[in-house]
Image (cartoon, rainbow, N blue to C red):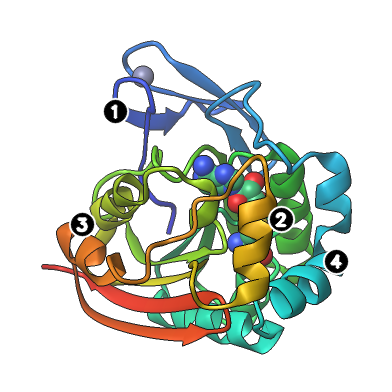
Amino acid sequence: MVPRLRCPVDLLELADDGGAALSCSGGHRYLKDGAIVDLQPGAEAPGFGRLRAATYDLTFDLVNTRLLFGATPRHLAALHRQAAAAAAGGVLLDVACGTGRWAIPELSRAAGTMYVGVDPAMPMLRLAQDRARRAGVDALLLHSDADRLPLADASVAAAVLSLGLQYVPDHGAALAELRRVLTPGGLLCCVAPALGLRPRYDQRHHRRVRKDHPIDRERWPALLCAAGFGGSEIETVGALVFTQARAAA
Ligand SMILES: C[S@@+](CC[C@H](N)C(=O)[O-])C[C@H]1O[C@@H](n2cnc3c(N)ncnc32)[C@H](O)[C@@H]1O
Ligand SMILES: [Zn+2]
C-alpha cells in the first residue's frame, strides 16, 4: 500500500512518472534513487553527515541512550513495536527515521505493512534503505523535514517520531503535520528529551553552543491537545518523555 505523496512546493499530488522521478501537475519533478525520493535536493541535516551516519548505530546506544538520556535500547524498541503493531497492513511513517534501526526490524515480522521514512540527512536515508532491503521490508524513503511532510492528508495509519523532535525548532508545527497525515484515530508514538529530568542532559544542553530543542514537559500535554491529539499516555524515563497519542477524529 503506497501512500499518496504531495509536492512540498504547491501541495499538489505527486505521481510516479514511470521513470526515475515523481512529478506534480505544477511542473515540479523530484528524482528517485532506489527507494529514496529527493524532495529537497542539496539540503542536509547539520551534524548527520557521512561519518556520523556510519558510526550512528554503534555509538548511539551507549553514549546517548544510556549515558546521556538514562534510558535503554529496550525502551526505544518497545515504542517502535507499538507503532508497527498499530500500522499493521497499512503505512508506518517514521519521521526523523535516521537509519531506521528500530522500526524496520519490527516490520520484517509484519508482512504487508509499508515503511515510509522521512529524514533530511541523505547518508542516514541510504543506511535505512540498505537495512530495509536486507530485512525484506517494502520501503519508501523521503528526503524531507518533520515540519514539511510530503504526504497527503490522512494517508498513514501510525507514525513514530523517535529522538528527532529535539532538532525541530517548532514542535507545534511538527505535531500539526503528523496530525494532518495520520488517519483519524491513528497512533503517534513519540520520544524526545526534556530539560529538568536528568542533570547530565541538562548540563550538556547548557554547555552546547548549537542547542537542541528539548520539549517542555509541563506544556507538552497542552501542545499535543492543541495539535489535535487525544488520549495521550505519557511516561518519563531518564531525560526522555515517551508519548502515545491518537489523532482526533
Ligand atoms: C538521533 S537521530 C534519531 C534516528 C532514529 N529515529 C532513531 O531513533 O534511531 C535524529 C535524526 O533526526 C534527523 N533530523 C534532524 N533534523 C530534522 C528535521 N528538521 N526533521 C526531521 N528529521 C530531522 C537527523 O537527520 C537524524 O537522522
Ligand atoms: Zn509542485
Residue 11 coordinates in the image, percent (x, y): 29, 28
Are there few (<14), some (14-19), or many (20+) residues within 10 Å of tag 4?
few
Amino acid type shown at disc 2: Ala
Residue 70: image quadrant is bottom right
- Mark 4 or 3 closer to N-term? 4
Label 3 and label 1: CA atoms lie apart by: 20 Å
* Image point (31%, 45%), residue name: 173
- Mark 2 or 3 closer to N-term? 2
Q: How many marks?
A: 4
Q: Do the residues labelled 4 and 1 touch (CB within 8 Å)?
A: no
Residue with the mark numbered 1: 11
Residue 217: image quadrant is bottom left
Residue 121 coordinates in the image, percent (x, y): 67, 40
Are there few (<14), some (14-19), or many (20+) residues within 10 Å of tag 1?
some
Residue with the mark numbered 4: 59
Are there few (<14), some (14-19), or many (20+) residues within 10 Å of tag 3?
many
Q: Do the residues labelled 1 and 2 touch (CB within 8 Å)?
A: no
Residue with the mark numbered 2: 128
Residue 84 coordinates in the image, percent (x, y): 49, 77
Along the viewing direction, whichever of 184 and 167 lies nearer the viewer = 167
